[in-house]
Amino acid sequence: MRGNTLKLLMAVVGWWTLYGLLLAGQLLGMEGPDGGVMPAAHALRLGLASGLMWIPLTWLLLWWVRRWPIERGRLSRSIAATTAMVLLMVVLRAAAVAVLNPWIGWYQQLPAVPALLWTSFGNNFLLLWLMVGVAHVWLYAHRAQAREREAVQLQARLTETRLDALRAQLNPHFMFNALNSIAEMVHRDADAADRMLVGLGELLRSSLDHQRSQLVPLHEELRLLRHYLEIEKVRLGERLRLEWQVEPGLDHLPVPPLLLQPLAENAILHAIAEKSAPGLLRIVVRREGGRLWLEVGDDGGVGDGAATARHGTGLRNIRSRLNYLFGDRHGFEIGPGDAGGTIVRLWLPCPPEEMAA
């Protein structure tokens, strides 16, 4: 707010200084009653004094327009109040000329008060109403900018609230599935269940560290995914094979938290866990142009119908979060893999500095 006020004050001072210099130039080109040309120093003194005297009056008028804007609902009162202020300024202008005339020299002989007031009225009344109009333009533009800022802030708060709701939806969903996996192992292999609980603790710690973050570095997201896959590896043993294809140098790129874990969970649930033979889960991370590509694929489940079954909470959540965070600046698709199974591909925009690198 202080910055805007300072800019406005500088604009007012600059405008009336320029006005004074232009007026001084006009005075230099005018002949006096004796046919002589006004000296440059005198013309500059008259012009600048006439212009700079408007600065406090303009500031007072801006304050008055903000207090009594001419708008629907109080039109008559505002016009009356503004007319009174304009007439007061006519008087103030005349009074300033009378007080400063010995030093500035507008008149060789100062006129009587009625004549001075009438001259001030004739010279300044319409100009003051023009200034009132300009002040209203400034006021309405200021209000429009304030409304635009409020709308942007409201939209940001709304988006954050929706993302918080999505996170609140995803965390219980993830916890239920992870605890379900551990419960399957308790009676079969207590040591394995214990290792899974330790892994779950690490996973939850990593998740809570970024609970309020909209974006996290890629290496944090991959670390969280590895914690999750360690749990599933204990449960599935040799039935789960992992293949990582992570391009180096991308660790710092920002991604939404808990983005890859639901994709890996779906692949394990709908493909790998359904068959007795070993299944492959492939995670690919690469950069191509200005996009960060993330892929999670499997080599197929029973009947190889996994692609049509993946419309659960995790995927709906991912789609919604990506829409809120990136709008149309992202891609998300599910389809058959090149060697069978299902692959989920998504891309996110790289930061501008990364695109230029």
Image (tube, rainbow, N blue to C red):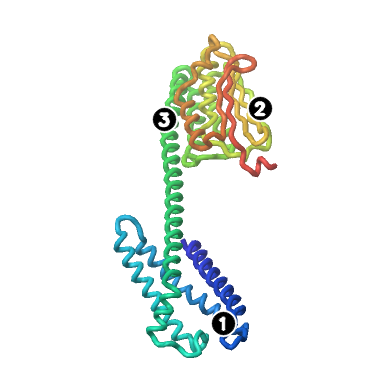
* Mark with earlier residue (3, 1): 1
Mark earlier in primary sequence (1, 2): 1
Residue ID for mark 1: 45
Residue 68, quarter of the rendered image: bottom left
Badge 3 marks a residue whose secondary structure is helix
Residue hosting label 3: 172
Say above or below: 12 vs 258.
Answer: below
Which amino acid, mark 1?
Arg
Q: Position of residue 271 (x, y in %)?
A: 54, 16
Q: How far apart, in angstroms, are the residues tagged by discs 3 and 1?
A: 77 Å
Against 342, residue 317 (above or below) is below
Q: Position of 256 compared to 356: left or right?
A: left
Q: Position of residue 128 (x, y in %)?
A: 43, 69
* Amino acid type, label 2: Gln
- Eye-nearest disc, 3 or 1: 1
Q: Nearer the viewer, residue 136 or 173?
A: 136
Determine the residue positioned at 38% across, 71% down. Answer: 86
Label 3 packing within 10 angstroms: few (<14), some (14-19), many (20+): few
Q: Residue at x 53, y 23 (%)?
A: 232
Q: Residue at x 51, y 37 (%)?
A: 325
Quadrant for the C terminus in the image: top right
Kindly identify the amino acid type of the residue bearing the numbered disc 3: Pro
